[in-house]
Image: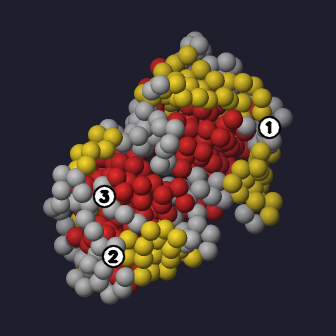
Amino acid sequence: MNKISINTSAAIPAASTINLSASKSESNRALIIQALSDEKINLNNLSDARDTQTMMRLLASKDKTWDVLDAGTTMRFLTAYLALTGKDQTITGSERMQQRPIKLLVDALRELGASIDYLKNDGYPPLKVSKITQQKTDSLKIQGNISSQYISALLMIAPMLPNGLTIELVGDVFSRPYIEMTLGLMQQFGVKNEWKENTIAIAPQKYTANSYTIESDWSGASYWLSMVSLSKSSKVNLTGLRENSYQGDIRIREIMHGLGLTTRFSGEEFLIEKKNSVSPMVIDFKTCPDLAQTVMVVATGLKSPISMTGLESLRIKETDRLAAMQTELAKFGATLVEETPGFWELEPPTELPEGPVTISTYEDHRMAMAFAPLAQKVPLIIEEPEVVNKSYPGFWEDCKKYGLDIKEA
């Protein structure tokens, strides 16, 4: 088992500039749009994340079996893509990917006319996908509280269907910003939509030629807001972010203003500074679940209680993130409790341990990156640190640049 130790024996500079990786969420959507277009689409600053590299590799592949590894977005987007363009491919993934549900997307694609078979367990990958030869319906009803990736996968193929597609989102819509991102990127390449109340309508149309530069990753930015919040007095400048972002995880900016930070845009940079004023908060993560682990760790390090809702989707991510966080936060004396259904309380420690504390990462990139900033308060040992390659391969090098002392353990 690979391990690294992290502490702050190295000097933390007064200010650091971090050149963030590009957003894999934008990259993966843009790559599907590019693959569906008959016209030339130029994409700049694509993510170096393993998920995006996997997407690029498979879109160029002529193999009969496509292995997405552990990339959930890639699995969902490519399943819909193959339902439109494929040639009886099998799509599979890691052991954990084969435990992540895909039934609602498969049911929707079957309604549209695709032939999809489960090769092991009903409702889960691997799948054999045969493309739609005749569109059976132009209208679908889908629960709004499911993974937005299912909805985005359907939206991106919608303009290429002979009759277009209308999707009615039933009930509360979770992760709405990710749906808005998908529609925004589709508009960048000429595809119009009509979203009224809970119904999205997309007429048959073509993606048109354009160039687009992928924004830096706000999920990646969240670890640097956490880093400054848990520091004594550091400042960090991040590059490549946009104040008017498609990414829902820009909400980390607002959340972290309540956890000891001030932020502002200055020219090409996003500036983060510590202000040392922390307030108890109630945070709804329904639209930004990938931020939850980061915020839980910050609250633990600052010994600040927080209340949370909208965490339901964390059960079916790379790991059961709620169970994983309960286990790892307990090592610092914090307690994560579901007080009533859907309402969670983080009770922080009165004192942090001396350390070093060993963090298990559960094959989940966000476990490693969420806990790393806490090394400024407690020496850490991180197991399987290479999990960060899924979304932010340069994370540990950026941590060294910031001033953390990182060694093999």
Percent of width and height locating residue 237: 52, 24
Between residue 384 and residue 76, name the one nearer to us: 76
**In the structure shown, which secondary structural element does the residue marked by tag 2 occupy?**
loop
Q: Which labelled disc corresponds to residue 190?
A: 3
**Disc 1, disc 3: CB below 8 Å?**
no
Between residue 36 and residue 351, name the one nearer to us: 36
Percent of width and height locating residue 266: 52, 25
Question: Looking at the image, which residue is at 62% across and 69% down?
Answer: 172
Q: Which residue is mark 1?
A: 279
Look at label 3 and name its amino acid: Gly
Observer-side mark, 3 or 2, equals: 3
Q: Which residue is mark 2?
A: 164
Placement of 290 over or under 36, stated as above or below: above
**In the structure shown, which secondary structural element does the residue marked by tag 3 occupy?**
loop
Look at label 1 and name its amino acid: Ser
Between residue 326 and residue 183, name the one nearer to us: 183
